[in-house]
Image: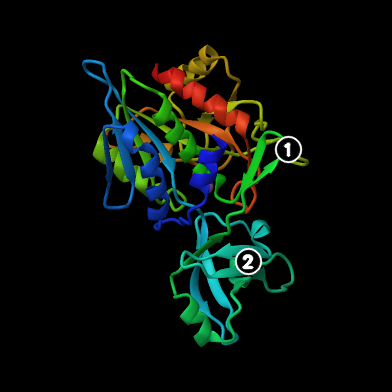
Amino acid sequence: MFELLKKVLAPIGPSGLEAPVAAVIREEIEKYVDTVEVDALGNLIATKLGKAENPRKVMLSAHMDHIGYIVIGAEKEGFLRVTNVGGIGMNASLTRHVVFPNGVHGVVVAEPVSGQPQLKNLFIDIGAKDKEEALKMVSLGDVAVYANDCFRLGEHRVAAPAMDDRCACALLVKLLQTVGETQDTIIAVFSVQEEVGCRGAKVASFAKEPDVGIALDVTGWGDTPGVHYPEIKLGEGIAVKVMDRGSISNPELREALMAAGEKAGVKTQREVLPYGGTDASAMQTSRGGIPVCTVSIPCRYVHSACEVIDMRDMDAGLKLLQTYFN
Ligand code: CO
Ligand code: ZN
């Protein structure tokens, strides 16, 4: 699983520019599914037909996009001005290595201000001598992401900037590769533009008309100094969401997923997240409404350049999902 995760973490794919991620995933899943397509927004949609006479359609959604900094202008001294694509926190933005899809590297820096710096105080130093050179190196509208830096922490943990949500993409790939024959039809959506409002999952769930929707995403953590909620601990199992700010999970579906975890003999955690949202929010209000839940991978420092997960939780998630479908 670690080798696959590393592969899926590597491509640069800010919201709206996910094609390099889709290319890597497509290659991994193609021979395990019945059809693969890419829709107009760039969602990669793989369908694995169920063996039941009248199979349920279960949509699983994991987003490929990653938060980033979009260029809105350049100073005459060559520094780029940027704004956020998705949820950029100031504390996570200070003096960070970023990279543009064309290979240009930069450092995100905040100018000194009295009080907390704001987004408007950020600039990216790409080593340009003036505005003209800067705008030859990158264009207005180009998006930088945190440069990939994937490393192991201790025996079980891994840090990387795009863990949200490539770890769930890797989990979904692994599920397709290992689940075998299922009664349900699985519609695996590697979605786009989650970080800017779950736009990919919205159109995919409309088009595919699933009976059930399950988002696969990271969740927050409550096990580091000064952080107690959500009550989620790394290494203590895969989390099943009760609620976040975007969706309330369907109770029967939630319990069925918890029961699958128990049957699989893996540790699970009940997740009540006082912030955030996932593709489940878009799926649940699609068409006439769809029962949804989110299977969540506990993740520390979400939306930073060092998002940390525990591989044991990934394994627990895989076993839970395999059991749910078998
Ligand atoms: Co996110
Ligand atoms: Zn996410």
Asked which quadrant contains residue 27, the reply is top left
Residue 55 left/right relative to 7:
left
- At horizontal 55% and vertical 64% (from top left) the residue drawn is 99
Which amino acid, by three-letter code, is at mark 1? Gly
Asked whether mark 1 lies closer than 8 Å to ligand 2, one says no
Relative to 99, say whether 30 is above or below: above
Considering the numbered disc 2 on the image, is that residue within a helix, a strand or a loop? loop
Q: Which residue is mark 2?
A: 118
Asked whether mark 2 lies closer than 8 Å to ligand 1, one says no
Q: Earlier in the sequence, mark 2 or mark 1?
A: 2
Relative to 183, say whether 240 is above or below: below
Of residues 318 and 119, the one nearer the viewer is: 318
Q: How is the image coloured?
A: rainbow
Which amino acid, by three-letter code, is at mark 2? Gln
* Label 1 environment density (alpha carbons within 10 Å; few <14, some 14–19, many ≥20): few
Q: Give the distance between the C-alpha atoms of the residues marked 2 and 1, in whole angstroms.
A: 34 Å
Q: Which residue is mark 1?
A: 154
Q: Is residue 252 visible?
A: no
* Label 2 environment density (alpha carbons within 10 Å; few <14, some 14–19, many ≥20): few
Residue 161 left/right relative to 18:
right
Considering the numbered disc 1 on the image, is that residue within a helix, a strand or a loop? loop
Q: In the rendering, at what x and y percent does residue 237 appear?
A: 61, 26
